[in-house]
Amino acid sequence: MIELSQVKNIFNSYDGINLISFTNEKNSFIVLFNFDANVSINGANFFIDYKIHLEVPKNYPAELPIVFESGEKRVNNFPHINPDRMGTFCLGTELDIRKKLKPDYSLSKYIPLIAEFLGIYEYYNQYSIFPYGDRNHGKLGILETYKEIFNVTTNQQVANLMQVTKLKNKSRNQKCPCNSGIKFKNCHWDTLSSILSSNIERTQIEKDYILLKGG
């Protein structure tokens, strides 16, 4: 859980942010601010100047914030704007974002993700390419995330590994669920152990598995 005082302290101390308002809603804190900052993306420097609407769930970090451009929409014709009525920013898959917020999940780590997103938009707008490659939206993006984390190539390998919700010592010497033929302890044991040791990441992988299965 996060308190309004924490949110205010973070935003009041952050360079490049000019606050407009805080609103305490039933389930979230809404922050309106102007984001004026210099951002370096892949060696290119950009000045970002946008009015931003950020909704921080009160149960953060169990639930992640949503963010979009307030007022005049200047970020447009960009593949990483979600197809919802608000035009929310796609900062990555939820697991991508959570890994960047570790280990303390401070909201102060979320703000640079917004700055990076806006900088990437400026880069894309100028050069018509993404600076670090691109990830798909929705289920394809989630699959790409887990393929990278697990270092596997097939959807079935991802599905097999995502179904492991508990690690049992008796399974260490059995073959890894990824079907590599290697013992679990010498293959994906450590990777899954890292994910499952975090309640937040374990919940996320369970949520993503249900989404991928169409549940």
Image: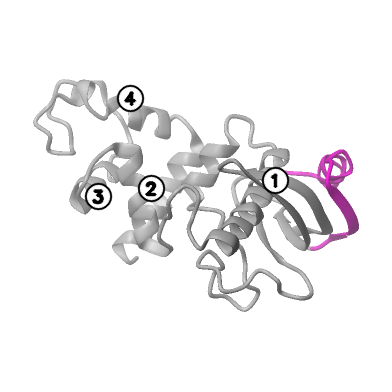
* Numbered label attached to residue 39: 1
Badge nearest the viewer, 2 or 4 = 2
Q: Amino acid at mark 4?
A: Asp
Q: Name the secondary structure under disc 2.
A: helix
Q: Amino acid at mark 1?
A: Val
Q: Name the secondary structure under disc 3.
A: helix
- On whether residue 15 falls in the magenta region, the answer is yes
| Image quadrant in which the N terminus is located | top right
First in sequence: mark 2 or mark 1? Answer: 1
Q: Residue 45: give x, y in percent of width and height.
A: 68, 46
Q: Nearer the viewer, residue 14 or 47?
A: 47
Q: Which residue, given by chain and number where applicable, does mark 3 sit on?
A: 159
The reply to whether discs 1 and 4 touch (Cβ–Cβ < 8 Å) is no
Which segment is the magenta one? 1-25
The reply to whether discs 3 and 4 touch (Cβ–Cβ < 8 Å) is no
**Distance in Å between CA atoms under marks 3 and 2:** 12 Å
Q: Name the secondary structure under disc 4.
A: helix
First in sequence: mark 3 or mark 1? Answer: 1
Q: Amino acid at mark 3?
A: Ala
The reply to whether discs 3 and 1 touch (Cβ–Cβ < 8 Å) is no
Q: Which residue, given by chain and number where applicable, does mark 4 sit on?
A: 190
Badge nearest the viewer, 2 or 1 = 1
**Quick check: 1 left or right of 130?**
right
Q: Residue 35: give x, y in percent of width and height.
A: 80, 54
**Distance in Å between CA atoms under marks 3 and 4:** 17 Å
First in sequence: mark 3 or mark 2? Answer: 2
Q: Which residue, given by chain and number where applicable, does mark 2 sit on?
A: 145
- On whether residue 159 falls in the magenta region, the answer is no
**Distance in Å between CA atoms under marks 2 and 1:** 25 Å
